[in-house]
Image (cartoon, rainbow, N blue to C red):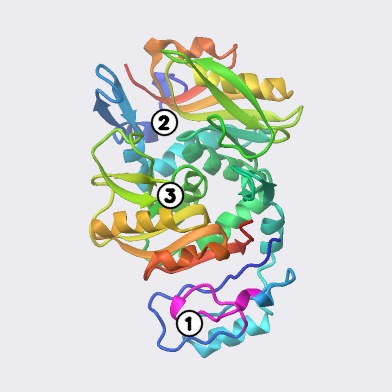
Amino acid sequence: MQSIICSHHLCLAPPPTVLCNRLLCHRVPSIRLTNHRSATTSLRLFTCAAASKKSEIMAAAKEDGQDPRIPKIASSIRVIPDFPKPGIMFQDITTLLLDTEAFKDTIDIFVERYKGKGISVVAGVEARGFIFGPPIALAIGAKFVPMRKPKKLPGKVISEEYSLEYGTDKIEMHVGAVEPGERAIIIDDLIATGGTLAAAIRLLERVGVKIVECACVIELPELKGREKLGDAPLFILVTSDAA
Amino acid sequence: MSGNKQDEDPRINGIKTKIRVVPDFPKKGIMFQDITTVLLDPKAFKDTIDLFVERYRDKNISVVAGIEARGFIFGPPIALAIGAKFVPLRKPKKLPGETIFEEYELEYGNDRLEMHVGAVEAGDRALVVDDLIATGGTLCAAINLLERVGAEVVECACVIELPELKGRQRLKGKPLCMLVEYR
């Protein structure tokens, strides 16, 4: 069953004490609250104001913190059972893309979060990351860097291997696409086990890029992908069951 | 914009200079048109999208169909700006729901392009987007898919055309809009 969302303010630096006025806080691993999913038995919305300023928390609490765009985004995602194999509940975002308001809202939420934060790189993981990444990059004035399966990029590449259920795969990026010191966000439609995102983080960090955040539309929290991301925070709009 | 040199928009040259040509990829003799370098220049990327958006915003386009994978980079920003749905056209077995497919020829053998059933409705006015048109085989398959479900393909839009491969003639009479030619 699909559940909630968490939208909150992005802080540039980790706050010394993080105050969270509700049960869910998806942003900073060090202050993760346990058993938060047991609270999400219904489609209620929470806003986690992971802000260091009390005034910001008061404002969030006052508006009751619900981003009104999220329910429509969540309900526009189609779940397809047993794809690509039995037991998997596949989160199909193509139906979100057919809903012009939901697609626009999805992009707007990410853009509002990342605009004006000195992010110069939006890296998108092939292929569904190519759908969400470029509109965000364009709106915040950042470059878009595609991270691709092997042998797709024509120029000189650097690669990073990651584990699959059986075997390994690789993700590649063009040499020279990014420069040391750049600030990046990494976009994909969904985080499951976190293997691909972790590889993307390693690839960018190898060339001296700072990962400000990973951003996905959907998280499957049972698969604990968040734990593979190291220090990189994760921002998501919708969580769902994996199977 | 569609190869009409005398009224070329000044933004086009900026885009053209950002395209990187990679020789002998994916095999010897091919001069690969790499658009990733355009994406690294926020102004050039924005100009690319703006040129298409300006052309299509008042044409009542309800669907932008983008061909995997580089059509996924250019299609969605256009769709968002003109208020159209975005429909990904994909290689086989990627789309999770019920699909229809169209086969097309490669140099050796065939491939397939798939679309979700129900994504496009009869009467939809569609734009097909890809980064480049070479032989036109993939674009032709895309046009077929859309027409089979009763959509009207208004135009095909590509950043780059390789005119010597005559892809333009394989578009079932549909017009092509491109920004940059490579001869």
> Where residue B134 sits in the image (x, y, percent)?
42, 18
Mark toward the viewer: 2 or 3: 3
Give above or below for A35 relative to B2: below
Q: Chain of mark 2?
A: B
Q: Quadrant of the C terminus of chain A?
A: bottom right
Which amino acid, mark 2? Asp
Which amino acid, mark 1? Ile
Residue placed under numbered mark 2 in the picture: B9
Observer able to see residue A222: yes
Mark toward the viewer: 3 or 1: 3
Residue placed under numbered mark 1 in the picture: A31
> Where residue A65 sits in the image (x, y, percent)?
65, 77
Q: Magenta stretch?
A: A22-37
Residue placed under numbered mark 3 in the picture: A164
- Majority secondary structure of magenta residues: loop
Q: Which SS class for mark 2?
A: loop
Residue placed at 63% from the left, 31% from the top? B115
